[in-house]
Amino acid sequence: MEAIAKTKYLKGSPRKARLVIDLIRGRNVSQALAILKFTDKRAADPIAKTLRSAIANATYLAEQQNIAIDPDDLWVKTCFVDMGPTKNRRRMRPAPQGRAYREQRHYCHITIQVTSEAQEDKSKKAKPETEVKKAKPVKAEKKAEPKAKKAEETVVEEVETKTAPVETTEAVETQEAKNEAEVADAKDATSQTPAEKNETKPADEAQLDKNEELERQ
């Protein structure tokens, strides 16, 4: 069961009335009335009056159609505020720098629709599945995989053998000869030990002694 109530030519700006009407959208009727009762805005009282009118219209329509409804089960389905006419007042308000602003008195229209249909719960909506089930591979595919891998390996080996550069026998022989010569040089080369370094010391000392004797003579 749905019912609508409207209030037209309400004194006040529609922008200010929307601040109050947004508080009761989608709420239960009893909860909406409690919110409007403790809202410190001038538009709260006329909006509450319109809401009570919508509840009364719903109960009246239900009685005419022989439908039993509980007023506490009603909730605000839609509610909005439209802009009304602007009254032309022949008054001016002083403004900065010697200017004058014209005063305007705004009006608005309030519309509230209530319903007794079951309200959809946002929490019960379908959640996107984060986990994706992995498909089981077919046995035939498992058996075919090793054969395919072997075929790929053989193809790769053939390509490598074809692309490998062919070395001439002369170049190989010269390289082997160089390697053998380097090994022989390494064997012949011996590190100079401290004893070998000191072999020349006695001869030097004898020469020095001879030079000293010659100087004395």
Image (cartoon, grey):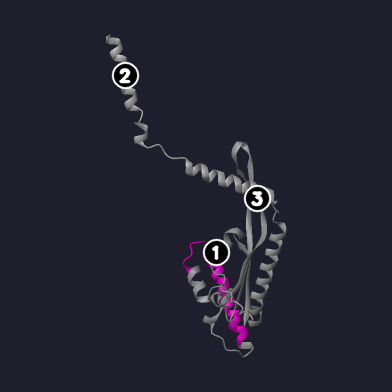
The mark closer to the camera, 1 or 3, is 3
Q: For the point 30% across and 12% down, which residue is it?
A: 214
Q: Report the residue marked by disc 2.
A: 208
Tags 1 and 3 touching, CB below 8 Å: no
Amino acid type at image mark 1: Val
The mark closer to the camera, 1 or 2, is 2
- Callout 3 crowding tier (Cα within 10 Å): few <14, some 14–19, many ≥20: few
**Which is the main secondary structure of the residues drawn in magenta?**
helix
User: Is residue 43 shown in magenta?
Assistant: yes
User: Is residue 131 shown in magenta?
Assistant: no
Magenta-highlighted residues: 37-62
Residue 53 x %, y %: 58, 75
Q: Quadrant of residue 134?
A: bottom right
Q: Report the residue marked by disc 1.
A: 20
Amino acid type at image mark 3: Val
Sooner in the amino-acid sequence: mark 3 or mark 2: 3
Q: For the point 36% across and 28% down, which residue is it?
A: 200
Instruction: Name, please, the residue furthest toward the bottom.
Output: 66
Q: Report the residue marked by disc 3.
A: 172
Amino acid type at image mark 2: Leu
Tags 1 and 2 touching, CB below 8 Å: no
